[in-house]
Image (spheres, helix red, strand yellow):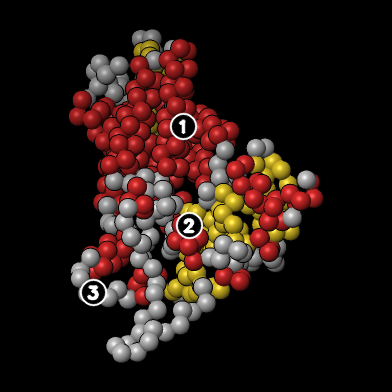
Amino acid sequence: MFEGHDPYLVALSVVIAILGGYTGFGLAARIRGTPDASHRLLLAGAAFFLAIGIWTMHFVGMLAAPLPAGAVYLVLPTIVSFLICALVVGISLFFVSVGEPSMLRVVSSAALLGVGIASMHYVGMHGLSGNFTMTHDAAMVVLSVLIAIATAYGGLRAFLARQGGVQLALSAVAYGFAVSGMHYTAMAGMHLVPAPQGSHHHVEGLTASSQMLSLVVALLCFVIAAGFLLSLVPDPRKKAAATIDVVAAIPGAVVPEAAVLVATIPPADSSAASTSPRLRPTPLGGIGQPPRAAPAPRLPVEGADGTHFIDTADVRSVRADAHYTKVHDGTRERMCPWSISEAEAQLDPGLFVRVHRSHIVAMAHVTFVRKEGDGAIIELDGPSPHRVPVSRAKIAEVKARLGLARRHA
C-alpha cells in the first residue's frame, strides 16, 4: 500500500488527520457548555477543522505518492473536493447535534459523511492530470467507501460523547488512523497507465503544480496546528470550578455565593458526585447576627451580559446538557451552570418531577400527554410550547400526578 510513498509525508498525513480530529472533537465537546448564541460558531468551527484535516491529509498523501513526472492538479476539481468534504461534514454534525439523536439518525449521518469523504477523495484524485490514464480496482473502491463510513460512524460517536482529556486524544488518534487508512486503501486500488508513445495529453482548465499545492497544504497545516494549540487552552468555567474547590478545601475559607452560582458543577453521573460534598448557596449572616432568611428558590441562567436569576414559578422544564442544564421558561431555553442533580435539589418536589434522566418538568404546566414507544411525550404550556420525553419507569408517576391513573383504574 505504501510502496514508493515518501514515509515522512505519510507520517505527516496521519498526524494532520489526528490533529484535525482532536481540534474538531474538542470544539464539539464545548458545544453543550455554552449559550445558544455560541452553538453555531462552535459547530461551524468543529466542521471546519474536521474538513480541513480530512482534505489536507488527503493531499499530503497525494504529495507522498510516486506520481508521474509532469503531473499537475486541476484547480476546479481540487476546490470542489474540499467543498464536498466541508458540506457533508457540516450537514452530518448538524443532524446529530439537533435534539437527542436516534441510532437511525447517527447511522444515516455516518453513511452520508462516509460517502462524502470517499467522494472527496475520488474527485480530488481525478483532479490529477498528465500524460496518463487513471483506473481503479472496484473491490478497493468498495472497501475504501466502507472504511470511510465506519470512520464517519466512529467520528460521530466521538462527537456525541463530548469527552475530554485522554478519551478525546484516543478518539482523535483512532479517527486519524482510520481516515488515513481509507485514503491509502483507495490509493492501493489506483493505477496510472502511461499514455502510448507519441501521444500528447492536452490539459484543459486552470492547473496547479505539485509545488503550488505544497504551499497551500503547508499553510493549512499551520492552520490546523494553530487550532490544535488553541484547543488546549482550558475552559474558563472549569478553571473557575477548580479554584472554588481549592478555596473550599481551606479551613475557615468563605466561598462567595455568586462564585458558587456560576461555577461548573460536576456531572450527576460522575463517580465523584456521590462521594464528594456539593457546594450550595447558603444564607450568610454577620457575626453575632441571626442568619438571613433563605430567599425564594431561583435558578441562575446565563445571558449575553452576565448571569440572571429566574424564579422557579416561571420554570417549565430543565434539561441536562453535559455538565450544565438548559432551563425553559415557556418562551425560550437558556443555559444554567448547575448540573441537573443540583437543579433538582433546589426545586420543590411537590411541583416538579424528574420524568427522565435528562429532564425535569413543572407538572402544573403540562397540557398534553401521549404514549410514544416504550415511554411517553408531554407538552408544556407557554408562548413557545415544547415537548419533553418521559421514560418508561416514570410513566406511572406522571399519570398519577396528572390524575390519569385514577381515571384508568
Question: Measured from the top left, where is residue 359 in percent x and y?
Answer: 56, 53
Label 2 vs label 1: CA separation? 29 Å
Residue at the (40%, 42%) spot, across then down: 50
Residue 149 horizontal/vertical position (percent): 47, 27
In this figure, which residue is indicated by the disc labeled 1? 153
For the C terminus, the quadrant is top right
Q: Check disc 3 and report the residue beneath it.
A: 253
Q: Is residue 91 visible?
A: no
Tell me which amino acid carries mark 2: Ile
Mark 3 or mark 2, which is nearer the start of the sequence? 3
Work out whether residue 237 or residue 346 is closer to the camera in this orientation and state it: 346
**Cα distance between the residues tagged 3 and 1:** 48 Å
Q: Amino acid at mark 1?
A: Tyr
Disc nearer the start of the sequence (2/1):
1
User: Where is the N terminus found, in terms of image quarters?
Assistant: top left
Disc with the residue nearer the chain's start (3 vs 1): 1
From the viewer's perspective, is 221 left or right of 360?
left
**Which is in the foreground here, disc 2 or disc 3?**
3
Type of residue at label 3? Ala
Which sits in the foreground, 51 or 382?
A: 382
- Measured in 3D between alpha carbons, the distance from the residue under mark 2 to the one under mark 3, in whole angstroms, is 27 Å
> Which of the pair 180/248 is nearer the observer?
248
Residue 115 at x, y = what percent?
51, 28
Tell me residue 118's x, y (percent): 46, 27
State whether residue 322 is above or below residue 287: above
338, above or below 357, in the image: below
Q: Is residue 292 above or below residue 269?
A: below
